[in-house]
Image (spheres, rainbow, N blue to C red):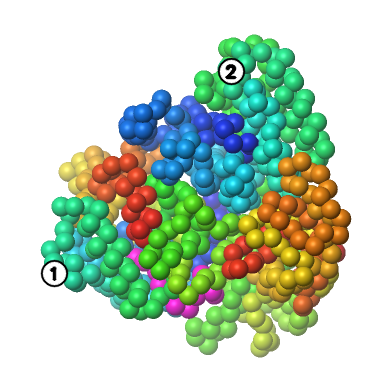
């Protein structure tokens, strides 16, 4: 086994069996600590219930009593190939913001659909969100096959409906697997009850996915996070979001346009010659420039977009609607700027994907809008498909993150 | 970058975000392995000079070795150490007979008093998602109201390392830079970085402590692991849960949820 850790989110409609599937994955891979099943049995007895695998993850009293996941959870298991971090995302429509919180941290997804109920409102919404977040590695599973007598026709029917919808939002699942999370069919072990299915189990298919590569081969983007002056040294601290840097590199800070050279790359108790995407470091400069948080260090021959107008897809998560006339805070990497909406070009219901209106004047909870923004000051951005780390942002209203946005064009 | 580098980098980013937003911040140091690893990460984040105080909540029931370790490294690492105690409750004789009361008064209440005295608005804590189911539900930046209550039913969204950074006057924020680590990660990091750690964790006479709290409420588990290497080997195979020796988790179902929603760490 190698050192890799892959983060998987499990999404789907409420009651379609996400938490049960995770409980099953842990049980079948022998990942539950001693006493866990006993504890769950005890709690189930106290509540007068049959033993529920879902209790492995649903920990809040309210979650167990109402059999619904409220907040996102993460747990760990491993296969022969590598480690997995499983992110359970709530299926209930009320908790969509928690689902997005979970999904935004994942590299791959399992979309679960109840074989009896078929595709539902949250199946579609969650699938849409996966697409918007840029998740490409997706396994679709048709669950509760035990309830439909493991019938191939039922599987084919649900599969067809699902693929038709996914195709309309440009998601192509790598696998579609018939399973019963409750009974353990095709999760870790191949089902004996569905001899008509010759494909992989969930675990086998997960092991074929690859870990997201850090964007080392892209242009250098080093957003300044803070400036420290604990002694005579003035250190510009930050995380390299993409690319490489080395001592002596000529750099330009944007949006200010100030130019200098990297004098040193600083780490705890030492210095480095080079550093790459993903590393939290500090740098000192050849010239004593005044640089503050939010400036982005780049190389002169690979400049980013600096703009005060751009278009983005925005998913609104807050209860209070987003009024197109209000000024709102936009945060992209370490940049923070006030902005206004120039125009809501169109908005969609995130489940039905019906266009609700062109040129709308507000965005309500769980609506998606294609929005033209105007920021007060120019900022450094990228198209999401080029450099994700600077191609996504959040909007902050009433001190909370209220929306996520993906930059589609300058 | 390997797995530990990635964990470390994510934590350092969070710690620096926290300090950027809150100058009235402190780190909670229980002297256990997690918060000592967090302390190490803070040293790395600020190039060896932690710019905020490090706070130890002293229930009066801690192991003697914990106090010795604390004072030694507070000096060696030049820490701004704050020791917080609920003197009144200790005088009134609060103790581990009633565990909910004891934890609430000597830990949660002591923390409240100390934060109020120092006018702190944010606190860094070394909790991890894999420790306890209820901690798995936590956000990295997690608001608490004036009574320290955690509204776990309506937590703010967190995406792409954009955290809740501003709060209303009544709130304080709990910041959890190590939520994504596991117990095994912690020990592998301690080994790699050579982080000093209290020897209470190491096995003596076939028993060891896996999680350290107060002396009276920590039960050792069977183990032969008397070095970090052996500990790591043990963790790779064990199926005994980490907090199996911690009394307050098991009194009854949802004890931990109750403690946490009331402001427990």
Q: For the point 48% across and 26% down, which residue is it? A: A28
On-image quarter of the N terminus of chain B: bottom right
Percent x, y of residue B207: 21, 43
Residue B48, image quadrant: bottom left
Residue A407, image quadrant: bottom right
Q: Which residue is mark 2?
A: A147
Kindly tell me whether residue A178 is visible in this rendering: yes
Percent x, y of residue B83: 27, 73
The chain under label 2 reads: A
Tell me the distance, in whole angstroms, between the alpha carbons under discs 1 and 2: 62 Å
The chain under label 1 reads: B
- The answer to whether A236 is drawn above or below residue A203 in the figure is below
- The answer to whether A17 is drawn above or below residue A108 in the figure is above
Q: For the point 70% across and 70% down, which residue is it? A: A328
Mark 1, secondary structure of its residue: helix
The residue nearer to you, when weighing B262 against B122, is B262
Percent x, y of residue A145: 61, 19
On-image quarter of the C terminus of chain B: bottom left
For the record, the magenta segment spans B17-29
Q: Which residue is mark 1?
A: B91
- The answer to whether A117 is drawn above or below residue A405 in the figure is above
The residue nearer to you, when weighing A373 against A207, is A373
Q: For the point 39% across and 46% down, which residue is it? A: B132
Q: Tags 1 and 2 in contact by the CB under 8 Å rule? A: no
Disc 1: CA contacts within 10 A as few (<14), some (14-19) or many (>=20) = few
Q: Are marks 1 and 2 on the same chain?
A: no
The residue nearer to you, when weighing A28 against A98, is A98
């Amino acid at each position: 086994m190698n050192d890799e850790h892959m983060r998987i989110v499990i999404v789907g409609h409420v009651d379609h069996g996400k938490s049960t599937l995770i409980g099953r994955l842990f049980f079948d891979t022998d990942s539950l600590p001693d006493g866990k099943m006993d504890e769950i049995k005890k709690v189930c007895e106290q509540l007068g219930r049959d033993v529920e695998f879902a209790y492995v993850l649903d920990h809040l009293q309210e979650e167990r009593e109402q059999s619904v996941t409220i907040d996102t959870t993460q747990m760990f298991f491993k296969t022969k190939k590598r480690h997995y971090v499983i992110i359970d995302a709530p299926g209930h429509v009320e908790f969509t913001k928690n689902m997005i919180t979970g999904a935004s941290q994942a590299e791959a997804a399992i979309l679960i659909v109840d074989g009896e109920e078929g595709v539902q409102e949250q199946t579609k919404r969650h699938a849409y969100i996966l697409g918007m977040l840029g998740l490409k590695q997706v396994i679709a599973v048709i669950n509760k096959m035990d309830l439909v007598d493991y019938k191939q026709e039922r599987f084919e029917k649900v599969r067809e409906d699902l693929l038709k919808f996914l195709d309309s939002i440009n998601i192509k699942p790598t696998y579609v697997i018939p399973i019963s999370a409750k009974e353990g069919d095709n999760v870790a072990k191949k089902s004996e009850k569905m001899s008509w299915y010759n494909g992989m189990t969930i675990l086998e298919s997960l092991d074929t996915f690859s870990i997201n590569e850090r964007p080392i081969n892209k242009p250098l983007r080093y957003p300044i996070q803070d400036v420290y002056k604990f002694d005579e040294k003035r250190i510009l601290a930050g995380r390299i979001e993409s690319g490489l840097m080395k001592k002596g590199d000529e750099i330009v800070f944007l949006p200010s346009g100030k130019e200098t050279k990297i004098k040193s790359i600083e780490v705890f108790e030492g210095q480095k010659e080079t550093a790459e995407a993903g590393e939290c470091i500090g740098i000192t400069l050849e010239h004593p420039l005044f640089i503050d948080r939010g400036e982005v260090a780049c190389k002169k021959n690979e400049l980013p977009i600096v703009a005060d107008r751009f278009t983005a897809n925005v998913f609104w998560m807050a209860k209070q609607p987003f009024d197109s006339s209000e000024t709102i805070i936009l945060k992209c990497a370490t940049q923070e700027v006030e902005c206004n909406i120039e125009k809501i070009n169109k908005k969609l219901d995130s489940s039905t994907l019906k266009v609700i209106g062109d040129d709308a004047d507000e965005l309500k909870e769980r609506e998606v809008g294609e929005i033209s923004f105007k920021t007060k000051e120019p900022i450094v951005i990228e198209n999401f498909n080029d450099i994700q780390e600077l191609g996504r942002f959040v909007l902050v209203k009433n001190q909370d993150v209220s929306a996520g946005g993906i930059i589609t064009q300058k | 970058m390997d797995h530990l580098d990635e964990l470390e980098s994510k934590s350092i980013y969070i710690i620096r975000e926290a300090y950027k937003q809150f100058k009235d911040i402190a780190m909670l140091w229980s002297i256990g392995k997690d918060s000592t690893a967090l302390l190490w990460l803070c040293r790395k984040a600020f190039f060896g000079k932690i710019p905020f105080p490090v706070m130890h909540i002293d229930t009066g029931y801690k192991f003697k070795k914990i106090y010795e370790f604390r004072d030694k490294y507070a000096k060696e690492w030049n820490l701004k150490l704050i020791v917080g105690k609920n003197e009144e409750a200790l005088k009134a004789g609060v103790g581990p007979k009633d565990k909910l009361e004891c934890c609430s008064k000597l830990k949660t209440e002591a923390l409240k008093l100390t934060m109020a005295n120092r006018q702190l608005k944010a606190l860094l804590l070394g909790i991890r998602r894999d420790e306890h189911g209820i901690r798995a539900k936590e956000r990295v930046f997690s608001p608490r109201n004036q009574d320290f209550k955690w509204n776990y039913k309506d937590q703010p969204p967190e995406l792409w390392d954009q955290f809740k950074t501003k709060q209303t006057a009544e709130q304080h924020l709990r910041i959890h830079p190590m939520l994504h680590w596991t117990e095994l990660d912690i020990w592998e990091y301690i080994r790699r970085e050579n982080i000093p750690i209290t020897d209470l964790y190491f096995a003596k006479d076939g028993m060891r402590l896996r999680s350290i709290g107060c002396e009276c409420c920590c039960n050792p588990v069977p183990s032969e692991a008397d070095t970090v290497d052996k500990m790591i080997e043990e963790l790779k195979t064990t199926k005994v849960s980490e907090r199996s020796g911690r009394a307050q988790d098991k009194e009854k179902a949802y004890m931990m949820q109750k403690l946490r929603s009331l402001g427990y760490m």
